[in-house]
Image (cartoon, rainbow, N blue to C red):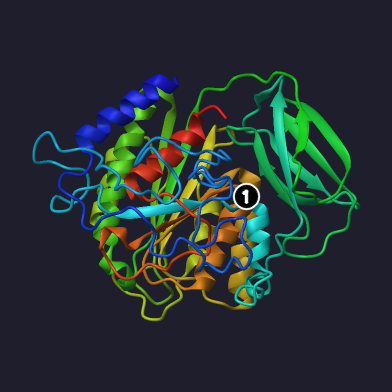
Amino acid sequence: MRSRLVFFVAFFALVLGGCGDMVGTPGSSTEPGPTPSTAGRDGTGVGAPSDGTGGYAGSDPSGSAGSSSSSGGTADAGVSTDPPSPAGGCLDTACAGPETIPAGQLTAGAWRDLDDWSFWLGLFDSDLYAGMHEYWGYDTTSRIPVRVTSAGVPVIDARVSLIDADGAVAWEAHSDSRGRAELFASLFEPQTGPFTVRVKADGVTREVADVSPAWMTPIAVEMPAPSAPPASLDLMFMIDTTGSMGDEIEYIKSELGDVIARSQAEATQDFDLRVSMNFYKDIGDTYVVDPHPFTTHVSDVVTQLAAEHASGGGDFPEAVDQAVASAINDHAWRENATARLLFLVLDAPPHHDADVMARLQAANRAAAALGVKIIPVVASGIDKETEFAMRFLALTTNGTYTFLTNNSGIGGDHLAPSIGRYKVWFLNDLLVHIITEEVAPTEG
């Protein structure tokens, strides 16, 4: 299956990829940030990754910890020293996305906090970020990672629950294509241990009792050999279409059109694909959320995407809480799937009040319980509060934080994230890589 997947990615990159040269020269981030082994962790240090390999320093966007290379962009990871090659030229004048804007121009990076947890926790030792947990109402310190396998093979889409001392469900998740599930105790409110990890798959239940939060070593749960359901993917996009997105939204539409086309090509051979395209603005705009159901008719999704333009907004925050709540609660996500991915494309935070926070946290909890990974795609103009809000959503749903960079020369200024060294990709290649790895991960 993997070989067919790679073939179709390469073929459709040639047919549907960007035509034309990149604006700017990707190759290094404008502010790579500290290495995971350094102190301070304030986003200002520069240096080689802690393992000295020039790799992701434990944060491949696919979630393969310690990977030093992967497909797409340059062969070497870290902050790449050579510009990634465009996805390919058009065979004729047609390109995916808007006619005047080819795909393969926006540049981006990715960071998976779950793969460098000591770095994440170290951020809160800094006066710059110490208040982020309290500001957004999260406490991520009591993480309990779980790995579900059967004879060494990952068990996909097992239901994984954390049960507190009173028998109540503290957190729920699903195992992904690598058998990983992420549980959190006392994330939004205090919960009392000792805790029990409960795993269900194919009608079989296993429990591990007297568990305490300890992220250094995942809780290993061995299950009987499960049935092998057909590979399937629910792929959703939720896009901020307020006026502040105007500097990049047409480029983003082109990139996402290419991502959808390439995903459809892969699905033809390897997995069952459903896509949902959704948009949101803010209260008082022409709409707050414009939802569309999952469909197998990708042409409908491309039409919906092409019809949208940036308008409205006004103040900085937008209705992110309502967007995420709609994405999770108002759509029929598959009960059984290889992967469920929500790409949240935005350039502004949610409003900051009690009702909004409650709605966002409830949607966050529901996403994890459904096995939906939230993958923010952060555009120009955000602040540090927005960055951390998106990283909270990503890590608590076993997802990845992705962000546009200044390397393309397109749009406004892009905030340098407070992370370690990372690889610069073309956005479309990065998202296809993430999708591919969620459905058919590479070894390791």
Provide residue 156's location: percent of width, then percent of height: 62, 30
Where does label 1 land, which residue? 114
**Rendered location of residue 91, percent (x, y):** 12, 33
Element carrying mark 1: helix
Q: Position of residue 68 (x, y in %)?
A: 49, 39
Q: Residue furthest bottom?
A: 315
Q: Position of residue 158 (x, y in %)?
A: 68, 33
Query: Which residue corresponds to the image point at 52% horizontal and 50% vertical from the top-left?
Result: 400
Outermost residue to the left: 93
Nearer to me, 121 or 233: 121
| Nearer to the camera, 104 or 27 | 27
| The quadrant where residue 217 appears | top right
Amino acid under label 1?
Leu
- Is residue 308 something that shows in the picture? no
Quadrant housing residue 315:
bottom left
Looking at the image, residue 122 lies above or below residue 148: below
- Location of the N terminus by quadrant is top left
Does residue 420 appear left or right of residue 193 in this picture? left
As drawn, is 432 to the left or to the right of 391?
left
| Image side of residue 310 versus residue 234, left or right | left
Q: Residue at x 63, y 59 (%)?
A: 120
Count of numbered circles on the image: 1
Q: Quadrant of residue 263?
A: top left
The residue closer to the viewer here, 341 or 12, is 12
Looking at the rendered image, the quarter that the C terminus falls into is top right
- Note whether residue 102 is visible: yes
Q: Residues within 10 Å of mark 1 (few under 14, many from 20)?
A: many
